[in-house]
Image (cartoon, grey):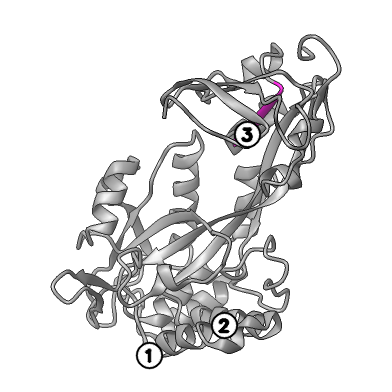
Amino acid sequence: RSKVLTLGAYTIVSNVQGESLELKANPYYFKGKPKIEKVTVEVVNSNTIVSALKAGKYDLALRIPTDLYKTYSSLNNLELLGRQELYYSYMGFKVGHFDKAKGENIMDPNAKMADKNLRQALAYGLDVDQMTKAFYYGLRERATMSVPPAFKKYYSKDIKGYPYDPEKAKKLLDEAGYKDVDGDGLREDNKGNKLVFNFAFQGGNNYDQALADTFIKSWKEVGLDVKLLDNKLMGKKEWDQRVLGDDPEIDLFLGAGHHGSDPSRQELFGRQSQFNYFRYTSDKIDEAFKEQRSDEMFDDNKLKEAYNKFDDLIADELPFFGLSWDTEITYVNKRVKHFNVEDFTKGRLSVENLELTKEAPEK
C-alpha cells in the first residue's frame, strides 16, 4: 500500500498503520484542487480527546464516546452536529447452540430461556426510556424495532416494541409458573427450583457497571434473580469467545451492532448464520426471509411491509429485543466552513469545497 493510485481529492503521503494518515491535495482532481492543502488523520485515545479539542488541536472529531458528552458539549470553540446512527443495542437470549457438523443453529427446548413468556417479561421489566436519559444524556432513544429511524423508507412508527410495564411482566411470569415459593422476593421456576440467570455484559465505558446494576435491579423488582456472569463485567475478547462459543453458563447477554446499507436481519437470525448468537430459529422466520428475497421486494413499499411484518414476528417470538438507537455526534471546529455531516457520513461530501477561515483551529 506504499504506492497508492487514486482519482480522489487527496493522495496519501504517509501511513502509520493504526495511528495516522498524511494526505495532500490532488491537483488533478476532476472537480478542481481542494482548497485545503494538507489533511492529517489520527486515531486518538478517548482519555485525551476532550483536552485536545479544548486546546484546538483538531478541526473534526468522529465517534467520541457518549459518556464524554458533558465534558465537551460546553466548549465554545466548536459546533456539534448530530445524526441518527445505524447503531443499535439489544438484549439477547441463549436458546441453543451452533452445530458445526450440520452448519446450522439448533434450538434447545430445555434451555432456561426457552419460555417466551419469560423472555417477554424480561423485556417489559426494563424502563429503557429512563435508562437512555440517565446514562446517554438523551443521545439515545428506546428501540421499538430492528429497523432504526435512520432507514426512513422502512421504519414504522406503528410498532411500539416493549415499553416499561412491570405489572405485565409479573403477570406473564405468574402465567408461566414462575412464582416466589419461599417468600424471599425472588421467583423459583415452575418446578419450585431456585432460578438464577447469568448475564454476559461487556464493559468499556465508565458508566457500564452502574448500567449493569440498573438492569439487575429492574429485573429483581419483578422477582427475577439476574447476576453478572462470574460476577463481573467482561472484556470484548472474552465476550466474543464465550457468547459466540455458546458457553452454557450464559443465559442472556447485552449486544450491539451497526446495520449496513440494507436493514435485512438474515445475518442475525438466519438458520445457518454463526452470527445468530441467540441460536433461535423458526419456520416462520425462514419463510419471512424467503419472502424478503423474492422479486416483489424490488418495490420499496412491499419491502417496507415485509420488514415491518418481520419486526412484528420477532416482537412476538422474541429471541432478542432492541434496547436503544444512537445519535452520532461529530465535533467541528468553528474555523471549518462548508461541512455537512449528512453528506460526510454518506460519502458524498464535496471535500474540495471545504475551507478553513483561520490559520489555526479555534481554542
Q: Earlier in the sequence, mark 1 or mark 3?
A: 3
Answer whether residue 301 is visible to the viewer in this image: yes
Residue stretch rendered in magenta on the structure: 59-63
| Residue type beneath disc 1 | Asp
Residue 176 is situated, as x and y percent measured from the top left of the image, at 38, 85
Quote the CA–CA distance across marks 3 and 2. 34 Å
Report which quarter residue 259 is drawn in: bottom right
Which residue shows up at 86% across the image and 17% down it? 357
Q: Alpha-carbon distance for marks 2 and 1?
A: 15 Å
Q: Which mark is residue 312?
A: 2
Magenta stretch, main secondary structure class: strand
Question: On residue 283, which mark appears?
Answer: 1
Q: Quadrant of the N terminus?
A: top left
> Does residue 61 show up magenta in the picture?
yes
Q: Position of residue 207 (x, y in %)?
A: 51, 38
Element marked by disc 3: strand
Q: Residue type at mark 3?
A: Leu
Q: Is residue 35 left or right of residue 169?
A: right
Q: Earlier in the sequence, mark 2 or mark 1?
A: 1
Q: Of the residues shown, which amino acid type is indicated by label 2? A: Asp
Secondary structure of the residue carrying tag 2 is helix
Q: Nearer the viewer, residue 334 or 164?
A: 334
Circle 1 crowding by C-alpha within 10 Å: few under 14, some 14–19, many from 20: few
Q: Position of residue 117 (x, y in %)?
A: 42, 81
